Amino acid sequence: MKLISSAKSSAKSSATRLCDRIRLARNEAKLSQTALAERVGVTASAVAQWESHNGTRPGTERLQDIAAATGATFEWLATGHGSKQRRSRTRDEETPAVSLGSFARDAHEELLLERFRRLPRRAQEAFCSLIVEITSKPR
């Protein structure tokens, strides 16, 4: 009887640790450690450390990136409380008044914006620095 109760308590407490919630969110998003690392802008070994019981913990900014990459809510990922998955819009909810395409003047700008939003934060900063550098030089 004790084996059953300890197995139940360990299954219940498995998502109480941050490392387990990160692993669960990654697995449910069907991402490898390498894929999550690429989306978040870190190495695969950093993700492995986050998922290790004795490993390092990601900072708040990284947790936000992990939540965005996996579809988990930040609250659940950070605390274990609240809804695990972000809620998707239903048909009854309003759609945005302006589409992404309304902000781009052509297909090139739309592609740039779409791809830019997929980049990890560090890559976005590097890209912005590059654009500033390129456009600041006299022609």
Image: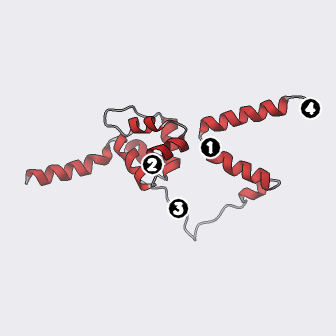
Does label 4 or label 3 sit earlier along the sequence? Answer: 3
Q: Which mark is residue 32?
A: 2
Q: Residue at x 41, y 48 (%)?
A: 76
Labels 2 & 1 near each other (Cβ < 8 A): no
Left or right of 134? Residue 111 is left
Residue denoted by label 4: 139
Residue 67, given in percent of the width and then of the height, sits at 49, 47
Q: Is residue 82 visible?
A: no
Mark closer to the observer (1, 3): 1
Residue denoted by label 3: 88
Residue 61, given in percent of the width and then of the height, sits at 52, 36
Left or right of 112? Residue 86 is left
Question: From what the image shows, is residue 92 above or below residue 2?
Answer: below
Question: Within 10 Å of the Cα at label 1, are there few (<14), some (14-19), or many (20+) other Cα atoms?
Answer: some
Labels 4 & 1 near each other (Cβ < 8 A): no
Residue denoted by label 1: 119
Mark closer to the observer (2, 3): 2
Report, in whole angstroms, how far the alpha carbon at label 1 lies from the one at label 3.
22 Å
Residue 88, given in percent of the width and then of the height, sits at 52, 61
* Residue type highlighted by circle 1: Leu
Report, in whole angstroms, how far the alpha carbon at label 4 lies from the one at label 2.
45 Å
Report, in whole angstroms, how far the alpha carbon at label 4 lies from the one at label 3.
47 Å
